[in-house]
Image (spheres, grey):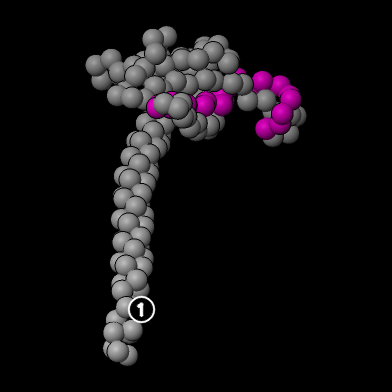
Amino acid sequence: MRLLLYYRNTRGITAVEALVGITIVAMVLVFGAHTVIRFLTVGGEVGEKTQALYLAEEGLEMVKFIRDVEWDTIAGLTDGATYYLSVSGVSVVVSGTPETIGIFSRSFVVEPVERNADDDIVASGTDDDDSKYVTVTVSWGSPAQSLSFTTIVADINNP
């Protein structure tokens, strides 16, 4: 009789244990699936951002190449206007046509560098005809993302 009472009391516990086990397995599967999806999403974003960084760096190098060939090309650009780069044969030229590389769009803007009487760069002073701020911007994606690099380029051929 005693054995029969013990048997009756343990039957519900087995069902509860099974339910707890199924819940734990389901939680592990959901967490694992979420982790894999997040890993793939972040991996794609990192790849796009890395490519954008390389394109921005390449854009700066292309502007420096133009500077090395002919400073007047850079000096003659309108401050604050948006320009694009184009490869023509073995040369790089400034273009008014938007540049698209895959999902990326690259542009650049020139701004004046201002200096004081001591030839230090200041926020407001006299425009330096032999140097310009260049900002290369790469945009991509939906929602829109972008990154920018800014540097100063100077007329290296002017002693």
Residue most extreme to the top: 96
Residue shown at the point (58%, 16%) measured from the top left? 80
Residue 97 position by quadrant: top left
Left of 131 or right of it: where is 123? right
What residue is pinned by disc 1? 9
How packed mark 1 is, by other alpha carbons closer than 10 Å (few <14, some 14-19, many 20 or more), is few
Residue sitting at x 63%, y 25%: 113
Can residue 150 be seen here? The reply is: yes
Q: Is residue 42 above or below residue 139?
A: below
Q: Quadrant of the N terminus?
A: bottom left
What's the magenta region? 121-141
The picture places residue 141, in percent across and down from the top left corner, at: 40, 27
Residue 46 image point, x, y percent: 37, 42
Q: Amino acid at mark 1?
A: Asn
Q: Is residue 135 magenta?
A: yes
Could you tell whether 68 is left or right of 14 in the image?
Answer: right
* Residue 151, percent from left and from top: 53, 32
